[in-house]
Each structure stands twice: as structure tokens, then as C-alpha cells.
Amino acid sequence: MTPEFSHSVILAQVPSGGQGLRLAANPAEREALARRLGLLALHAFSAELRLVPDVERAILVTGQLTAELEQECGVTLAPVRQSVSEAVAWRLLPTGMEPSDGEDDPDDIESEQGAADLGEALAQQLSLAIDPYPRAPGAELSQLVGEQEAHGPFAALLKLKRP
């Protein structure tokens, strides 16, 4: 699979003093990501990152991911616009380095041939940050379910239910 939003970083080229990096998806990348993530639209997607080498030759990545997106309401299917802002805390591992298992450790991203794809890592973090059950203002599942129950297969049983 070719990532929709790709930005490879060669770990050995990160300066010893670290570097700042701003990544932003262009319209074609946002459209492709929206399709992949099942969104109506991805209006904006960017990240401000800081990359700093650590003593083990890994690269510590910190920063902030931001996105503006639209998805369907889980009840009414109306468009719901959302803002996403997520902290980024990763460790890019050089080839051959084993991931750590600590709960409080940053997420480990393994490199392939000394390079890691920050764009794909950001896309995956966005996929985890999206509300899985978006609701339009005023949308209530109980109203919709109540209407369906009166005409559904259990309508007769509902009449037998004691008040």
C-alpha cells in the first residue's frame, strides 16, 4: 500500500541538536486520506514536530497534530464537523533496535533501512483520534430507536411490557 500522506525521515540525517519540522497535507493527500478513513472531508491536516536524537541512536519526536474534518452523524447521517488536536510522542527506532514495552514510554516506530515515514505515522494517529460515534447537535438515538420499535418485529412484545 502506498501511503496517501508520506514524509520519510532518514534517522542518521537528524542533526545532533535536533530539528523542527512542519508537515501539512495538500488537497489531494487530504482527499485520499478522507477516503481511507471514511470521512466526508478532511479540510486541514498538519503537524508541528520536534525531532531530537537520544543516547540510544533513536529519534524522539514530540509535537502536535491538528485536523479539521467532517464525518456522518451516527444517528441522522448529517455532516458533523470536528476539530482534532492530539499530542505527538514517538520514538523512531533505528534498524535492529527492539521496541520498549513501558506504559509511559512514547510509541515506538520502527524504521526500515534507516528511514521512518512520519506522514503515515501521523495518518495512523489521526485515525485513532477520530470520534468513532459522532453526533450532530440534538441527535438522540433513543428517539430513532423508539420510532423503529413501534413498527419492528418486537412491537407486539413491547405492548406486553409492564409499565
Image (tube, rainbow, N blue to C red):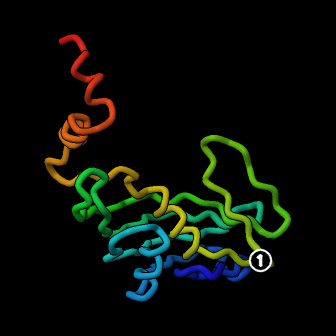
Place of residue 77 in the rendered image (x, y in percent of width and height, measured from the top left): 26, 59
Residue 90 lies in what quarter of the image?
A: bottom right
Q: Is residue 153 above or below residue 38?
A: above
Q: What's the amino acid at mark 1?
A: Gly
Q: What residue lies at 40% left-to-right and 52% top-to-bottom?
A: 132
Looking at the picture, tell me which residue is in the foreground, 34 or 162. 162
Q: What residue lies at 62% left-to-right and 55% top-to-bottom?
A: 107
Left or right of 90: which side holds 38? Answer: left
Place of residue 44 in the rendered image (x, y in percent of width and height, measured from the top left): 34, 76
Q: Is residue 1 above or below residue 108?
A: below
Looking at the picture, tell me which residue is in the foreground, 40 or 50. 40
Kindly give the residue lying farthest to the top in the view shown: 162
Residue 93 lies in what quarter of the image?
A: bottom right
Left or right of 4: which side holds 113? Answer: right
Looking at the picture, tell me which residue is in the foreground, 50 or 64. 64
| Residue ID for mark 1 | 114
Quadrant of the image containing the N terminus:
bottom right
Assign a secondary structure to mark 1: loop
Give the class, few, some or many, for how many residues have Cα within 10 Å of label 1's Cα (few <14, many ≥20): some
Place of residue 144 in the rendered image (x, y in percent of width and height, measured from the top left): 21, 43
Place of residue 28 in the rendered image (x, y in percent of width and height, measured from the top left): 43, 88
Q: What residue lies at 63% left-to-right and 48% top-to-bottom?
A: 105
Left or right of 147: which side holds 3? Answer: right
Q: What residue lies at 68% left-to-right and 74% top-to-bottom?
A: 116
